Amino acid sequence: MRAVVVIFPGSNRERDVCAALARATGYEPLRVWHRDGALPPSDLIVLPGGFAYGDYLRCGAIAAHSPIMRDVRDQAAKGTPVLGICNGFQILTEAGLLPGALLPNRSLRFTCRDVHLRVENDQTIFTCGYEAGQTIRVAVAHHDGNYTADPETLDRLEARGLVAFRYCGPQGESVEEANFNGSARAIAGVFNETRTVLGLMPHPENVSDPQLGGTDGQAFFDGLASALQ
């Protein structure tokens, strides 16, 4: 599997996601600078976490207009899988590749800690390493992770199985305190209509090695590598 990781000024999680992908595939992903005009041939495009352009204007708003994003849109339209994690999720919504928007956390504070997610749909290339209903522990590190969309869009996401993950309690239970950032319907990640683009606010790459304190995230990358090999 050939993966490409796009780096923007302010990205800071590219090494983490590259390491997780390398563990899953045996190959180091190619890193591409955001000002490049075109992407090399690839099986997966990743927009990593960070603070692209310092999160000025809105998180991801400037990065969504970087030169490389024209080709990201073109490749996504052709069916190349695209994964956006945290800041990458924000960029994908600003670029119109995913519905909705990411607003400031309801606490109005940056939050960095472990949380629990419930896998909502395991019938995709991104989630096939898990089982539907499974609870996993992953890390979050964001200020603007409050997913929002109009009621019609939220209903469509639910009806078409486009909700990937939800914030939950340790046993998978839906509890208000688990939805720490106030996301609509506790949504932590969503797919596009073809389920080939995923935006995910938490960081599976940060729980992909025992030395990082957990391995729940490695199944995400292992499943993705298996689906795309």
Image: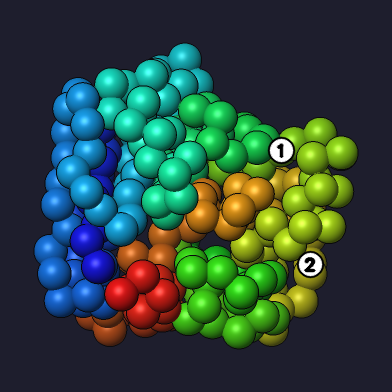
SS for callout 2: loop
Residue 203 on image: x %, y %: 42, 59
Residue 59 visible somewhere in the drawing? no
Residue 201 on image: x %, y %: 51, 51
Q: Relative to 62, is 180 on the left or the right?
A: right
Residue at figure coordinates x 71%, y 38% from the top left:
148
SS for callout 1: strand
Residue at figure coordinates x 33%, y 49% from the top left:
45
Looking at the picture, tell me which residue is in the foreground, 31 or 218.
31
Quadrant the N terminus occupies: bottom left
| Callouts 2 and 1 close, C-beta under 8 Å | no
Location of residue 104 by image quarter? top right
Looking at the picture, tell me which residue is in the foreground, 160 or 144.
160
Task: Give the amino acid type for the residue marked by disc 1 in the picture.
Answer: Thr
Disc 1 target residue: 148
Q: Residue furthest top?
A: 57
Location of residue 26 by image quarter? bottom left
Task: Give the amino acid type for the residue marked by disc 2 in the picture.
Answer: Val
